[in-house]
Amino acid sequence: MITDFKGKTAVLTGGASGFGLECARIGASLGMNLVLVDVQKDALKAAHDELQALGVQVMAKRVDVSNAEEMQTLANDVQQRFGAPHFVFNNAGVGAGGLVWESSLQDWEWLMGVNVWGVIHGVRLFTPMMLEAAKQDPHWQGHIVNTASMAGLLTPPNMGIYNVTKHAVVSLTETLYQDLNLVTDQVSASVLCPYFVPTGINQSERNRPGHLAAAKPTQSQLIGQAMSDKAVGSGKVSAAQVAQMVFDAMRVNQFYIYSHPKALGNAQTRFDAIVAGSNPPDPFAERPEIGIQLRQALRGE
């Protein structure tokens, strides 16, 4: 929980676009010190210049969040300039689709590296710093927000690799919340589970490192990309609105942050089946036409 953001420090991965940039803009309006972390050099510079012009302290770092050494250097730099951060937003993420067995080793390494290891590094490096700051000052407040997805609560077909990474983030963050509750009342955690929001994640390939280059996409991957483009592009909730939800949640120590609460009906159906020991339910029960189209496309009918 953080009740007063003025003069506090925020570390935001994926900070040059999407939820990260929108949270940085809100942080700037509240007088926070900002640490922007991203791999997109030009976007990072543009974000740095925009936010610094608002009169707040901004440090921009080009970092691959999957890289342990780069993240360690980032943590050291943050500690040296600002001390322990109060708000850590482990938000950097990439997306990929396709039938689960068609994902290449490079696909797995890329998504696991950014979506899972990026969050792990953020948690393991910054949490001890935050706990030490809380120990030194009984009024110190800190909060960690990890970006998962509704795909961390559901298992939609043809996007298994993404589902796996986001389930890991939900599990990690729920456990982090419980672990923090054991040792402190001053630092807490939340998990962000957005649905389809226009952020640019569906164009993740632009940031894919060369050593993990993609093979020629399979039919299922092309279909998955097209469906993702359509769903994200038609999203009615903006990244700015979701960023406001993040700050609202931190103020009241709300753990689950949903951009589209109505999508929880699908999660309820899934959890009911788990408790009952039933087979996984039809993920397209509410939109059967999408399931029909996907089956026909994959079967070449």
Image (cartoon, rainbow, N blue to C red):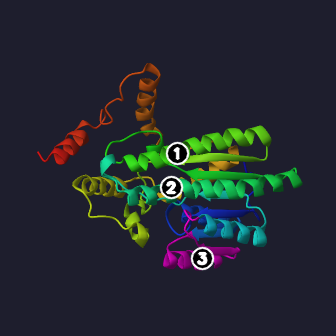
Residue 68 lies left or right of residue 131; in this view the side is left
Residue 254 seen by the camera: no
Q: Rounded to the nearest whole Å, what is the CA distance between mark 1 and mark 3?
A: 31 Å
State yes or no: discs 1 and 2 in contact (Cβ < 8 Å).
Answer: yes
Residue nearer the viewer, 3 or 202: 202
Reply yes or no: does residue 86 show up in magenta: no
- 10 Å crowding of disc 3: few (<14), some (14-19), many (20+): many
Viewport quadrant of the C terminus = top left
Residue nearer the viewer, 202 or 6: 202
Which residue is situated farthest in the top direction here? 276
Q: Amino acid at mark 3?
A: His
Residue nearer the viewer, 76 or 240: 76
The part of the image, by quadrant, that contains residue 89 is bottom right
Look at mark 3 in the image and give the residue it sits on.
48
Q: x, y (%) of residue 3?
A: 75, 51
Find the magenta span and give its range.
38-67
State yes or no: discs 1 and 3 in contact (Cβ < 8 Å).
Answer: no
Residue 138 lies left or right of residue 114; in this view the side is right
